[in-house]
Amino acid sequence: MRWAIVLVACWLPGSVWAAPDTVVVCPEAFREALGPWIKHRTEQGHRIELISNLKSAPQIRAKIREIAKGKALRFIVLVGDADPAMKDRRDIRARCVPTHYAKAKVNILWGSEPEIATDNWYADLNDDVVPDVAIGRLTADSPAELSRIVEKILTYERSANFGPWRRRIHFVAGVGGFGKVADAVLEMGARKLITDGVPAPFSTTMTYGSWRSPYCPDPRRFHQTTLDRLNDGSLFWVYIGHGHKRTLDRVRVPGNTHHILDTRDVAKLDCANGSTIAIFLACYTGAFDAKSDCLAEEMLRRKGGPVAIVSGSRVTMPYAMSMMGTAMLDEVFIRRRKTLGEVVLHAKRSMVAPQGFSTRRLMLDMLAKAISPKETDLAEERKEHLHLFNLIGDPLLRLRHPEPIKVDVAGTATAGGELRVSGRCAIDGRCTLELVVRRDRLTFKPAGRPKFDATDQALAAYQKVYQRANDHRLVHFVVPLVDGKFEKTIRIPDAARGACHIRVFVEGAAGYAVGAANVRIKQPRPEKQ
């Protein structure tokens, strides 16, 4: 029966054979568990060809290239782990798909191994290192694990929950530890990425491991806060910082360190709303060829964990990671790619494509010069990250983009005064309207932290400041949506000032919509005596 599904996938009405657009490398023992996924993708119009996992990596690649001659190939899905012991044990080899090892040139300057485990090699059809099709790996070790992964993918795509989780993006960041100047540059780059890379209609949070920052919660609660953000449900959950194969970095305060996340915490993952897509801008978290399963693999297999993970298999470098993160945001929010695999594919291609003048690129290049070894070739560093970053998940995973909301509002307003907001939307549903400060600003002025205070009272204050820092709202309303139109006159708080946004979100029965407009809040002129 399962072979019939595969054959039908490449057969069109009128007895015309159509070239496959998707190649799946899958162990025989896993094909029944993959059946619901094949059926789902076939119903979406994909033409799938399965090939054996028992050949060598070069033989598998040659078969993929042969299929690609049909000029239709867009996706490659590898089903199974890349266990290093598979060469010695036939039972392990039967459930694995071999990966490729590329020679490291740049990241060895940062202490990495001389070889990089990469699936990018399969997606490079013309030997220029740059991927030509989207690729991802479902790292299951058994049919039962694969069934859980498939169920999570199908649940994600079929979800009719169009609530606020779809516009949330959670960032968790550690401290670089590269030195005072370099860390300051990294922090500036991360702030720029979040402020400029994520469109204004979307909601973001930051959980930062520097005790001096208002975005640092009570350090004793950093681990729980990280879990809460994962389980909250969000479009993306992004970690920026140091990582290892099975654990993230620790939060350091004078006299102590605090846990963030490791593989032992995976059992605690339970996304209450939609499963998130996790992005690790960190070293080793995606080392899918390691003897023990890495953090990304463990998270993918957990029913309540992320639906997919983008992560690095070896030491990754701050400059190229920033380039990759920025490029992925562009592919999601500007180019609105239809699948996660295409987001990763085109982000990689963008990293090595010739770039024109760009303020953001100049800033990232400056960051690289501040923290990279002097002998680093930035072009080679970007190219090496095509190997380093891999998608642990389904490259065909469909992204549900929001409908636009047209927001009409005056460009300036006065604190203490009124502001009329109106707009229209193609989706009917619950309409939320907010006045928010821009992401690089706060609604209050936090007190400085020249010294670390470990008392319970002081750390409780950390938590309160953290919660305030992550709430950018000045006012918040639920407004009626009549025939796709809304209108509201809001009073601006007396303390409001500076660059702000009107942000609108509509949660509908069959979709969601977002919109925003810029507004600058001025303080009223003092009355003449």
Image (tube, rainbow, N blue to C red):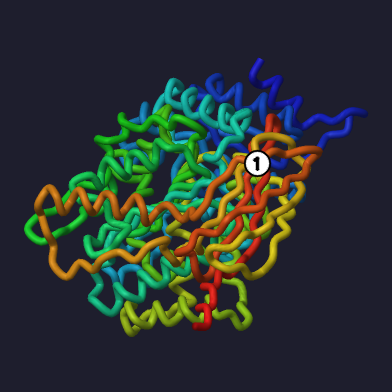
Which residue is nearer to you in this view: 84 or 504? 504
Residue 243 image-quadrant placement: bottom left
Q: Residue at x 62, y 60 (%)?
A: 418
Say if residue 345 shows up in the picture: no
Identify the residue under disc 1: 479
Which residue is nearer to you in this view: 246 or 20? 246
> Outermost residue, front direction?
529
- 106 left or right, relative to 363: left
- Badge count: 1
Locate residue 419, reporting x and y percent.
64, 59
Mark 1 is surrounded, within 10 Å at the Cα level, by few (under 14), some (14 to 19) or many (20 or more) other residues, namely some
Locate residue 219, reporting x and y percent.
20, 51
Q: Residue at x 32, y 34 (%)?
A: 266
Locate residue 454, reporting x and y percent.
10, 54
> Outermost residue, top direction?
1
Which residue is nearer to you in this view: 29 or 288? 288
Q: Amino acid at mark 1?
A: Val
> Outermost residue, left direction?
255
